[in-house]
Image (tube, grey):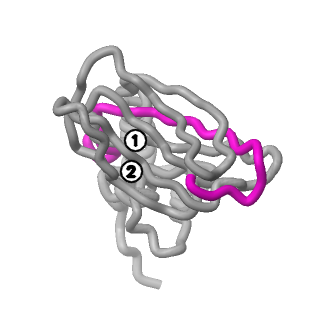
Amino acid sequence: MRSVGLLPAKIWLTHLSLPTGNRKGYAFIGNLPPNTHGVLDDAIVAMAHSVGDSIRSFWASSLGETQGACSGGDDTVTLKLKAAAAVKTVALSEDLSAGQKVADYTLEVRTAAGGWKAVGTRETIGMQFLHEVGKMVDAVRVRCTKTAAAGARVKVNALSLAPTEA
């Protein structure tokens, strides 16, 4: 079998962050195999540390987060930032302890002009979904338009970095 070599950390981060809408139904599972002596090579360890550092930097770029309930119809969960900021990514997650409930939503941002603008629409949030935003905003909201059952809990996190920039 031919070895394809070690993928750079940025490629790993790109695959790990593909819930941004480009993942076509696959889950990325990284394989960091040991060498023929059963030991991880230094290059693999260094790359894994680099990926971990980048992931920690990405989540540390949070500008604020909130959570709230969505029952469908026109419910919203709104995150108001302390001041207008450049938001590159919005991470959404849903409490799945009682099953996945959000069945349709729109992500909106409020710009300096004061108006709300839709930046993403999807059917489900699930465990986590990353939306690329790339706008100067002072608030972010999720408009839940349909739920499979009442009591959906949604968490909204605005971040100043894109996953591959960390």
- Which residues fall within the magenta stretch? 145-166
Whether label 1 touches label 2, CB < 8 Å: yes
Q: Is residue 98 left or right of residue 16?
A: right
Question: Which residue is tagged 1?
Answer: 90
- What residue is drawn where x is 63% and y is 61%? 103
Q: Position of residue 107 (x, y in %)?
A: 42, 48
**Quadrant of the rendering where the C terminus is positioned:** top left
Q: Is residue 31 magenta?
A: no
Residue at 45% from the left image edge and 28% from the top image edge:
79
For the image, the number of numbered tags is 2
Mark 2 lies on residue: 131
| Outermost residue toward the right in this view | 98
Q: Nearer the viewer, residue 164 or 162?
A: 162
Q: Residue 141, position in %: x, y?
A: 44, 38
Q: Position of residue 20 (x, y in %)?
A: 40, 57
Which residue lies at the image location 35% right of the left edge and 67% below the top edge? 5
Residue 33 visible at all: no
